[in-house]
Amino acid sequence: MSSEQKLANAGPLGLMGFGMTTVLLNLHNAGFFPNSSIVFSMGLFYGGLAQVIAGILESRRGNTFGTVAFVSYGFFWISLVGIWLLPVKGLAEAPSKAFMGWYLVLWGVFTLFMFLGTLKGSRVLQFVFLSLTVLFALLALHNFLDSHLIGVIAGIVGLACGASAMYLAMAELLHEQHGHSVLPF
């Protein structure tokens, strides 16, 4: 690669994969739709695979934060789909609610540390990671307490989190395309 060749910004791809998949799952969590093949497919391919690809591309640009975020959350989605589908296929036992709660706690702790990495970034990026930290905490509590209400609240927080990631994806994309800020971020 020549020093003059510009690498594409894969951030909008990763953010959109995360955002759209998060919105779809949280439409389910908020009680609007049952969990279905739509969420499973988005989790595997757009939330999962596309984010992993975006993370690898961010690595080529030297963006450690983007690499860790997109690859990690891409594999979060793929592992979540595995947690849901492996028991259905008889390949593994379904986790207890408590064990699922711990899975979500670990992702929440990871996300809290990732949020700290956003403190010199844009306010929208900070909101994405802070709301995701809150979302993981609420989802963990939902599992530990088996509380429908906490699950619905988590769904609403998840909708805001996913929508903010989608907004940031488009703000970054439009900024790059137009050479100036079209949507503030």
Image (cartoon, helix red, strand yellow):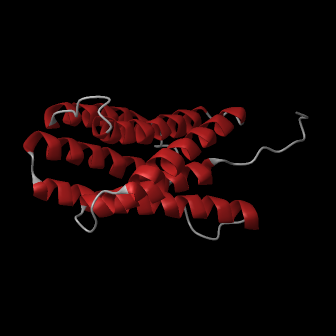
> Is 59 positioned to the left or the right of 21 in the image?
right
Q: Describe residue 124's horizontal placement relative to residue 181 as left or right.
A: left
Say if 90 sits above or below 145 in the image. above
Toward which corner of the image does residue 149 lie, by quadrant?
bottom left
Residue at 50% of width from left, 43% of height from top?
Answer: 48
Q: Residue furthest front?
A: 90
Residue 24 visible: yes
Q: Closer to the camera, 25 or 185? A: 25
Residue 117, position as x, y percentages in the image: 47, 37
Residue 12 higher or lower than 62, as above or below: below
Q: Is residue 161 visible?
A: no
Query: Looking at the rendering, in which quadrant would you find the C terminus?
Result: bottom right
Q: Residue at x 9, y 51 (%)?
A: 147
Relative to 97, 116 lies left or right? right
For the point 78% across and 43% down, the residue is 7
Most foreground residue, 119 or 77: 77
Please provide percent x and percent y for residue 151.
18, 54
Instruction: Identify the image quadrant of residue 179.
Output: bottom right
Tell me the quadrant of the picture where the N terminus can be found. Answer: top right
- Using residue 131 as the reference point, say whether residue 69 is left or right of it: right
Task: Looking at the picture, tell me which residue is in the foreground, 125 or 1.
Answer: 1
Q: Which percent across, then down, holds residue 31? A: 22, 65
| Figure label count | 0
Residue 14 at x, y = what percent? 56, 48
Residue placed at 58% from the left, 69% from the top?
183
